[in-house]
Image (cartoon, coloured by chain):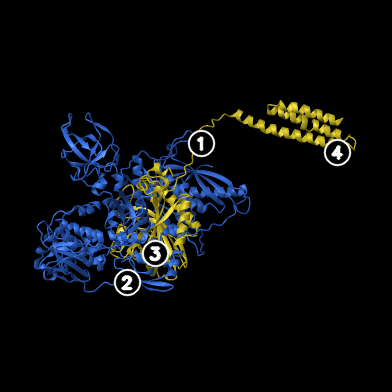
Chain colours: A yellow, B blue
Amino acid sequence: MLTKEIQHVKEESEKDFSSVDNPKELEELRIKYLGRNGILVQLFEELKKVPKEDKPAVGKNLNELRNLLTEKYNLLKTDLEKTDDTSEEKIDLTLPGTIRTIGSKHIIIQTLDEIKSIFKGMGFSVFEGPELESDYNNFEALNFPPNHPARDMQDTFFVSEKFLLRTHTSPVQIRVMERFKPPVRAIMPGVCYRNEAINPRSYCVFHQVEGLYIDTDVTFAELKGTLVSFAKQFYMDDLKYRFRPSFFPFTEPSAEMDITCFICKGKGCRICKNTGWIEILGCGMVDPNVFNYVGYDSEKYTGYAFGMGIERTALLKYGIDDIRKFYENDLRFLKQF
Amino acid sequence: MKASLNWTKEYVNLEGIPVQEIIDKLTMSGLEVEDFVNQQEIYKDFVVGLVTSKEKHPNADKLSLCKVNTGSEELIVVCGAANVASGQKIVFAPVGTIIPLSGMKLGRAKIRGVESFGMICSEAELGLGNDASGIMVIDKKLKEGTPFSKALGFDDVILEIAITPNRPDALSHIGIARDLAAIFNRELKYPELKIDEAKDEAKNYASIEILDTKNCPRYSSRIIRNVTVKESPEWLKSKLTKIGLRPINNIVDVTNFVMNELGQPLHAFNLDQLSGRKIIVKSTKEKMKFTTLDSKDRELPSGTLMICDGEKEVAIAGVMGGENSEVTSETKNILLESAHFNPSHIRKVSKALGLNSDASYRFERTVDPNNTDYAVNRASMLIAEVSGGEILKGLIDVYPEKIKEKEVQLRFARVKKVLGYEIPKESINKILNKLGLKTILQSQDEIRLQVPTYRPDLEREVDLIEEVARIYGYDQIPAVPKITITLEKKYDESVFTDEIREIATGLGLYEILNNPLIDERSASFDGRPIKILNPQSVDMAYLRTSLIPGGLIVAANNINKGEKNLSFFEIGNIFNKISENEINSFEDFIEERRLLFILTGKERKKKWNSTEKVVDFFLLKGLVDSFITKFSLDNVLNDSYYHSGNRNFAYYFTKNLKEKVIGLGGKVSKDVLKQYDIDQDVYCFELYLEELKEIQQRKKFYSLPIKFPKVVRDFAFILDKYITYEELINFIKAEGSNLLNNVKLFDLFENESIGNDKKSMAFSLEYQAKDRTLTEDEVEKEFLHLIKLIEKKFNAKLRGI
Ligand SMILES: [Zn+2]
């Protein structure tokens, strides 16, 4: 008897709820079915009269009906409230949002940051040093004898006979080695100066990152491994590379690292001077003479050092055609990065 | 250095090795081939042609129509050269040839109505020289149709090799051949000496004396009599031309040839011009003038090593000969110099004179002292051959103290320790022997080697390790797949500036980077600038003393390009002299890092939902304060001091730390803006980062927010116009009870209705207690008390609460 009634209410309510289209009607239905004197309350009253053995089954049915109705009501309520809002106020949501300006770091600094984070991940510390340096730190302690043609490799701005604008970040090597005993593992970023003709490929100011690792068993093979890992992280994972013998007074053996030209993929182009290779850094095993200058035992310790120019690196990585653009600070340039 | 591969092959047999492999291996062993020209490749289409007839072009006076026999056909060619003539053998480029000078492909072309089927080439078009005045006329005996490269020996590969300063030995063909012999494991052959000496002894015709043996340890010489100075034979001219040298005469050409063959610079003197037939090598005692053979007068500093005869100077030793003893077409008898000079002395002289010659370039990098005799013999032999002269008997060789070969020990274990890779002992030995080092002792663990004097760079064990590694191949040494991370204390000295950059960009500023080298006026902005001794230009003759001038230049450049609304920051070093002396120590100057904010134009343009906002002083001040707050410096740096104008600013303020200024900026003065051609207001502020770094509080501790409610009260006063906000706020903070937690100015106006010398300021006050909820009565009492105090102190009139 009551089961039938429940079924009937269920069907009727479905009809009722499906035709509702405003909050007022919904409220009426709530009162009709779920209200304090609503149909459900009445049905629960009826349930008391049902024979004991049928009670669980009928009760279950009734509970299900209550859940169904409550759910329907809630669903419709949220739905109708939404529609209600838009009908009150029409906004053109396509109007432009209010932009908050976020500036940007200079692309050279961003490139430096990326390099720094790769090396920090490999256990390197970061040190800085002055730009106005002594001839001793910049040249002599790095095994550039006075009056030696090796000095021609780096055209220098002098402020006096003994002081100059550093031509590389390598003098920070000397400072770090004078400050700490091995193991020393650090990179040293900073501004450097060279008295070179200004043209699209060279500027008199540039940034460099120097790297240094000294311990009892540092080898050329480890230098290669570390720099290859760096290049893969920084440029691309599947790059080809080569280490080419070179000369720096403060390393022996010395090398330059080339990677496949990523403009022409090694076929040869203007950027790589038709060699298919692009030089990305200079490196080598720290020359024992440098150890002698800073008081390290050159028999006990070995170490490697490397250095790369950031402007050059950024030119390659971002396809910038003129190194001077880094120092023009044109807002339209800065905003691109 | 330019080298010819064919020439190199005279000293090492490279048969069976492709050109590309030779080039790659040279580069990969340290003699970097920067560029090369494969003549066989670029001349492959050019042939010898015979001009069979020449007629005038019907439509152009300066052009002619030539028929050219190319060996296989006869073609019509339009030619513009005046020197073309029937019967000439010429270099012909058929249609489709790529012309070396232009790099362009030659097409079939109608020239003034006549079709031309090729080109008769000039030296310049072939890339062989600068002569573009006419076509290149070649030997009549050459047969038409012969490939040009074969006919004239242009079948070479010309290498442009970058020689590092440590490798003077490689500034010669024999040196390059020696490396190739080691790389490809081939034999190195020196040219054979065959000298026919005359009966007369050289020492009876000339004498040599070295007075400065420190700067000239050896002087070897030969005398050649009855030479005929003339044009060199083809083989000699061709060798020199290929490596970019201009043939001069047979004597000079031989000296240049031998220098490029063996690396020993030589000089030929006209013996009859040498007074007393004497050579005396000595240093000048005082400054003097000297005319070098390029006819230039040079001012020589005292102490310059000179070659002199019995009465005068005849050459600047190792740098350049003098005009007064030059070999000319009349010269009959010559004295050939082959000497060794002290490298650093030659470098000093060459630098002082600004005179760089092929000879000085080699001498300053060290020339083998023990090869001067061989070189002078080789040159004498060739001079006799090409000039018909006779070599007098005996070498005049002054070498008071022989420079000995060094001995260096190499431990096999050390090779592995440095490289991380074991190279077989036999390979080590072989490589070093091929490079000319003699094994003089060998044991299980080490070898002892004698290093030839042409390798001054090999002094220590590690130098030999590099030699072994570069010839064995760096690529043979594997890159390790893993590294150990050592656990010493780690530092990052760049964290401080990194953090600043994060905040500054978050505040909407773009970072700029400027050249610290600027002109004197800009450099004098804020201190005593340091001058560069050797600047590139006056624009970059000083180091900056402030970041502001650089920032203004950037602002001006952007404004000129139409970008008028700018917010920039820069982090950079500035430099200041602190002593009157020349800079001789780090105490004589200061280098410190600064941070610059620079703002101009509109901070915000007008938008559909907001008005525009033009940059003003308070925006700059707010920016500085936001930065300081975010940088956790607010409880150290709440002191600001305000100033009226000076030279640089219309008005400005400073941030101070215990009397010390650690930041300064404001509205840039009109005068300064005019200097930089800026006609809009610019605001900037410079913070001194060294000081900030020291006081920045690294550690922040959490403090519990107050959980009891605030009670807010507002009041507005009319007061005298000249009472500053700062005076008032400081008074409120000092006197406004300890329950007063926060005070903010929310309105300010001046108006005739309140009086011309008055202003109204409205404040909002927040009262709050840490330990309880404040009652209205309690707050009311404090609030009214404060109003009374203000009225009394400032003679202010309460306008409303
Ligand atoms: Zn390329």
Q: Position of residue A310 (x, y in %)?
A: 40, 52
Viewport quadrant of the N terminus of chain B: bottom left
Answer whether residue B793 is visible to the viewer in this image: no
Instruction: Tell me the residue that label 1 is attached to.
Output: A97
Mark 1 lies on a secondary structure that is loop
Contact (Cβ within 8 Å) of mark 2 with mark 1: no
Instruction: Tell me the residue that label 3 is attached to.
Output: B468
Mark 2 lies on a secondary structure that is strand
Give amino acid for label 1: Gly
Residue situated in front as seen by the camera: B201 or B782: B201
Task: Indicate which disc, 2 or 3, sits on the residue closer to the N terminus.
Answer: 2
Q: Nearer the viewer, mark 4 or mark 3?
A: 3
Residue situated in front as seen by the camera: B219 or B610: B219
Tell me the chain of label 3: B
Instruction: Tell me the residue that label 4 is attached to.
Output: A56
Which residue is found at the position 21% from the left and 37% from the top? Answer: B68
Residue situated in front as seen by the camera: B523 or B392: B392
Q: Nearer the viewer, mark 3 or mark 1?
A: 3
The answer to whether A258 is drawn above or below residue A8 in the figure is below
Give amino acid for label 2: Lys
Residue B438 left/right relative to B400 = right
Residue A284 left/right relative to B71 = right
Are the residues under marks 1 and 4 on the same chain? Answer: yes
Viewport quadrant of the C terminus of chain B: top right
Give amino acid for label 3: Val
